[in-house]
Image (tube, rainbow, N blue to C red):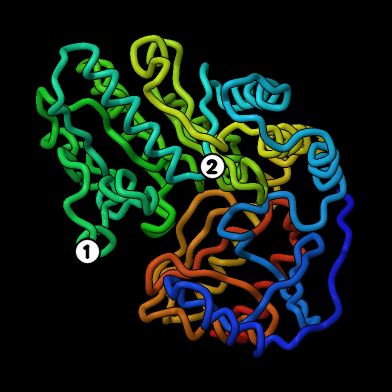
Amino acid sequence: MENRREGNATMDMKAIIEQAERDLLHTYNRYQIVLDHGDGMYLYDCEGRKYLDFCAGIAVFALGYGNEEYNNALKGQIDKLIHTSNYYYNVPAVEAARKLKAASGMDRVFFTNSGAESNEGAIKAARKYAYRKDGRTDHEIIAMNHSFHGRTMGALAVTGNAHYREAFEPLIGNVRFAEYNDFDSVQSCVTDRTCAILLEPVQGEGGLVPARSDFLRNLKALCQERDILLIFDEVQCGMGRTGYMYAWQRYGVKPDIMTTAKALGCGVPVGAFLMTEHVAAASLEAGDHGTTYGGNPLACAAVEKVLDLFEKHHIIEHVREVAPYLEQRLEEVKDRHGCIRERRGAGLMQGLVFDRPVRDIISAAMERGLILINAGANIIRFVPPLIVTKENVDEMISILEESI
C-alpha cells in the first residue's frame, strides 16, 4: 500500500501542551508529545520527531498512516455528501452494510459512532428481545470481571472493573459479573431472568486474555438451551487483529449479537452492532433506537473503503504471517528479563505482563522513538497497525529492550 507523509512546519510543542492544559477537561494523563502527521508505520510530532507506532490509536489505524486510497475515498465523499440523517437512505451506508455482513457473517447492521455506543445498542436489543417474550422489565445480563465495554452509563454498567463504575453509580441495574474463562462461574449467575451473556472473545483492557475454546462453546450451548442471547464485544479484537476478521471466527462460535468499532473506520469515528435475522425479527423495532450521525455517508464511505482494502491487500493473511514472529520476539524478551512474568494475547493483540508498573518503560520507549500503551498498570500492550512488518517488529524489540 502506498503511504505518504504530509505535515506542517514545526511548532512549539511545549506551548501547545500548555494551551491544551488550560482549555481541555483533564480526563486523560497524556504523554508529553503533540502528534502532527503520520506515514505508514510512523508518526511525527509537531517538532518533526519520528516515532514507530505500536499503538495504532488504540488498535484503530489498521491500514497505517497516509494511505492514499483511503484518504482519496474520504475526500471524494466529502465533496459529494457528508450527512443527511437516517430519515433517508444513502448509498455508502447500503454498500458498507452489505460488505460488513459478508465479512462478519451476521445478518443485520446498525451503524453507530463508537464502540461504547455499539455496546449500548447491543444491551438495548437484548433487553427488548427478552421483553417481547414475556413483557417483564427485570431481565439480567451476565458480564465478565476484568472486562471493558466503554464509558457511557450502559456500557460502564457491564464493565467488570469496580474502579471505573463506583463514582457513577447507580448505573443500569440487573447486571451480574462472572469470571472470564470459568464456565461454572457463569452458570452460577444464570437465573430465569437472564437475557444475555456479554463478553470480549479477547479481553483488551483486562489484560490481553483470549477466551478458551471450550468456554465459548459451553456458553453457546447454554444460551441455545435457555434462549439467552450471546453477545460478543469485538470492538478491539475484531477487524483482523487476531488473524480473523472477527475473533469469534477463530473459535467457530457465532454470537447472536456482535459489536464492532475501532479499525472499522480506521480513524473515522464509526461503529456498529450486528445481529442474526432471528434476533432482528424479535427485538428492536422502528422508534426503539436511533442516532443522528450514525451511518452517515462519510463514515460509511470509510467503512466501505476499509473493507475493500482489507481484501485487496490481503490484510488477514498478512496478520497471520507477521503475528507469530511478534509472539516469538516477545517471548525472547520475556526470557531475557526477569521482571516480565508472561506474554499473552492473540494475533497482533499482544501483552507483556511485568512485575511492576510499566509507565516508566513506556515513557523511556517514547524518548527513544517508540509509541507503546499499557493495559492496566503492569502490562504493556502491543496493537500496531496491521501493515506492520517483521523489520518493524525487530526495530520495536530493540527499542523496548533498551527501555526496559
| x, y percent for residue 17 | 60, 83
Whole-angstrom CA distance, mark 1 to mark 2, is 25 Å
Secondary structure state at the residue bearing disc 1: helix
What's the residue at 58%, 58% (across, down)?
383
What's the residue at 40%, 20% (across, down)?
287
Q: Which residue is mark 2?
A: 113
Tell me the crowding category of disc 1: few under 14, some 14 to 19, or many 20 or more residues within 10 angstroms, Cα based: few
In the depicted structure, whether residue 292 falls above or below residue 12:
above
Q: 18 or 34: which is nearer to us?
A: 18
Q: Which residue is mark 1?
A: 167
| x, y percent for residue 245 | 60, 35
**Nearer-N-terminus badge (1/2):** 2
Q: Amino acid at mark 1?
A: Ala
50 sits to left or right of 361: right
Q: Quadrant of residue 42?
A: bottom right
Q: Amino acid at mark 2?
A: Asn
| x, y percent for residue 224 | 28, 16
In the depicted structure, whether residue 89 falls above or below residue 154:
above
Q: How many marks?
A: 2
Residue 362 visible (yes or no): no
| x, y percent for residue 387 | 74, 52
Secondary structure state at the residue bearing disc 2: loop
198 sits to left or right of 66: left
Q: Quadrant of residue 198?
A: top left
Which quarter of the figure is the C terminus placed in?
bottom right
